[in-house]
Image (cartoon, helix red, strand yellow):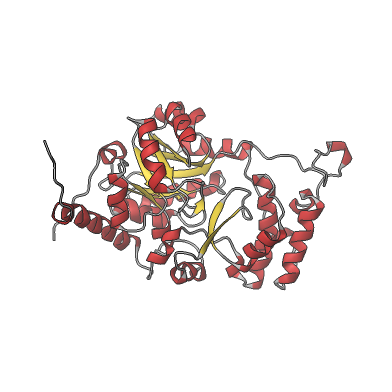
Amino acid sequence: MARPVLRTPICDLLEIEYPIVLAGMGGVSTADLVAAVSEAGGLGIVGAAGMGPDEIEAQVSRIRSLTDKPFGVDILLPTGVAAPRSPDGAERPAGDRPPPRRPFDLLPPEYQAFVRKAKAEFGLADPPAEGQARRRIGPDFTKQQVETILELRVPVFASGLGNPAPYVESFHAYGAKVIGLVGNVKAARKVAEGGADVVVAQGHEAGGHTGRIGTLALVPQVVDAVSPTPVLAAGGVGDGRGIAAALALGAQGAWMGTAFLVSREASWPQLLKERILAANEEGTRVTRLYSGKTMRNITNPLIELWEAEGLPALPMGLQGIVAGEIATAARAAGRLELLMNPAGQVAGMLHESRPATEILGGLVADAARVLSELPRRVHIAVEV
């Protein structure tokens, strides 16, 4: 049987067969999934936000052992981590606080109290100090990540958060392409003006870090704002109909995460995949609990407890300590349902776990079918 044809100009730009890009999802989009998507004709992207240089190098090496097709690496570009603040909101002078013994000591008292309350609520024990996670996101860590990606000459660099403009020239120097993800028109213009080759317009429906504007409204406005820079649509795209809709909105393809979260190759616990498969269209909630920024997750009791508490989220690095302290204890206790479980509103469309190659093939065939049937299904009368 002949392979379906689904091609837009972005395929030539990224040197791929189909205009479908795997979202760089941290902890999920790792080498085997990335290679499977790229080998099947899409563009696989590693979610490397929390990976140090050695981890990134290992991932890239593994991908290159599995495929010779293009792939990318996605990181977050934070503006820095704010200093801890006192309960009244004033920044504490360095001399007024002792050196922290562990990340937990950086948290203001009310956030330490929330961590203790959550552990008590869910019966979680304090893990040994040496087993506790260390948050590494920050300017120095990002610099090391970027330098590593450059040294490895990765074909595509993507920024899931932040403007990649400072790094565009370095990546273009060896022919790499740069992708920037945005949630509004203002950010889209900045990313395009900064030299990014592709802008991803991600709507509110998306899983993980997400903005306030729906995909249907956002995509055409971004397309108009950044033309001729090509745009990929993200958020609410879960099948071939969604891809066809993205093309109708002016996008040249789709950036897809949730559809691949339940793939066999997605590298995270089976329970979290099953929670996505069991969810309906109302099974997600946007929260700042896990990172300090708005993130859509499959809802869980920990999210409900955090939202009921009414605490404002801390800056990204510090809020990660709040969630990380609880997550470490939850893993130790086998309470995986309390962990971060990003997923979009298309979760209600997903009903089984399949190999990534099968998922991508189905998306392409479905989109091609929908587009080919449109002339027969839609009757247009034109008066001259």
The part of the image, by quadrant, that contains residue 315 is top right
Residue displayed at 71% across by 56% down: 310
Q: Is residue 240 above or below residue 80?
A: below
Residue displayed at 77% across by 50% down: 107
Considering depth in this image, is 257 or 303 the residue closer to the camera? 303
Drawn side of residue 333 relative to residue 263, left or right: right
- Quadrant containing the C terminus in the rendered view: top left
Drawn side of residue 62 relative to residue 310, left or right: left
Residue displayed at 47% across by 61% down: 267
Drawn side of residue 289 relative to residue 159, left or right: right
The part of the image, by quadrant, that contains residue 341 is bottom right
Measuring from the top left, give residue 114's x and y in whole percent. 75, 60
Name of the residue lying farthest toward the front: 383
Drawn side of residue 84 relative to residue 284, left or right: right
Q: Is residue 43 above or below residue 194?
A: below
Q: Answer whether residue 290 is visible to the viewer in this image.
A: yes
Q: Answer whether residue 127 is visible to the viewer in this image.
A: no
Measuring from the top left, give residue 39's x and y in whole percent. 30, 52
Measuring from the top left, give residue 181's x and y in whole percent. 46, 41
Measuring from the top left, give residue 326's x and y in whole percent. 68, 62
Considering depth in this image, is 233 or 144 the residue closer to the camera? 233
